[in-house]
Image: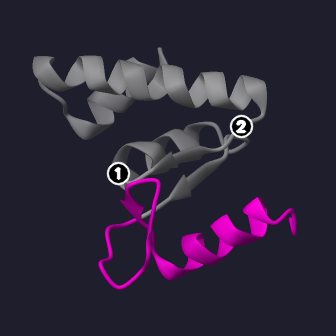
């Protein structure tokens, strides 16, 4: 049902519906396990967060000025949160 709402709001075609279903499954599984989803997909996950505000999503964007961690270039806020999480400061 969540995937159907996302597809209608985003006006996805048939090819994008499977990706939306996978995003919804990942979002719900992470919520169930108390995990945070790390994604650059702001458009879909913003809608999911509006529908289910208890989910946790951490967004990143590509930025060549920030050191590359795990193959991702993270924005400064996420970069600083990453190190705090790694060092157990949260």
Residue that numbered label 1 is attached to:
43
User: Disc 2 on helix, strand or loop?
Assistant: loop
Q: Quadrant of residue 82?
A: bottom right
Dot 2: within a 10 Å radius of its alpha carbon, few (fewer than 14), some, or many (20 or more) residues?
Answer: some
Identify the residue at horizontal 12%, vertical 25% (top origin): 13
Q: Mark 2 highlights which residue?
A: 35
Question: From the viewer's perspective, is residue 77 above or below residue 68?
Answer: below
Which class describes the residues within 10 Å of circle 1: few (<14), some (14-19), or many (20+)?
A: few
Residue at 74% across, 23% down: 32
Q: Position of residue 16 (x, y in %)?
A: 19, 26
Comes first in the chain, label 1 or label 2: 2
Q: Nearer the viewer, residue 8 or 84?
A: 84
Q: Nearer the viewer, residue 50 or 44?
A: 44
- Residue 72 x/y as whole percent: 39, 59
Spatial CA distance of label 1 from label 2 is: 20 Å
Given residues 80 and 87, the one toward you in this image is 87
**Looking at the figure, which quarter contains the C terminus?**
bottom right
Please state if 52 lies on the left or on the right of 14 as rendered.
Answer: right
Magenta-colored span: 61-90
**For the residues carrying marks 1 and 2, which lies nearer the camera in this image?**
2
Q: Nearer the viewer, residue 39 or 79?
A: 79
Left or right: 40, with 25 as reference point: left
Going by the picture, which residue comes out furthest to the bottom?
65
x 36%, y 49%: residue: 41
Residue 7 lies in quadrant: top left
Location of residue 54 in the rendering, given as x and y in whole percent from the top left corner: 73, 41
The local secondary structure at tag 1 comes to helix
Residue at (27, 17) in percent of width and height: 18
């Amino acid at each position: 049902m969540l995937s159907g709402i996302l597809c209608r709001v985003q006006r996805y075609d048939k090819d994008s519906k499977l990706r939306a279903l996978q995003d919804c499954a990942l979002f719900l599984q992470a919520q169930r396990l108390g995990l945070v989803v790390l994604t650059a997909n702001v458009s879909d996950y913003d809608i999911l967060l509006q529908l289910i505000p208890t989910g946790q999503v951490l967004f990143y964007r590509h930025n060549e000025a920030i050191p590359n961690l795990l193959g991702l270039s993270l924005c400064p806020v996420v970069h600083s949160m990453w190190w705090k999480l790694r060092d157990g400061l949260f």
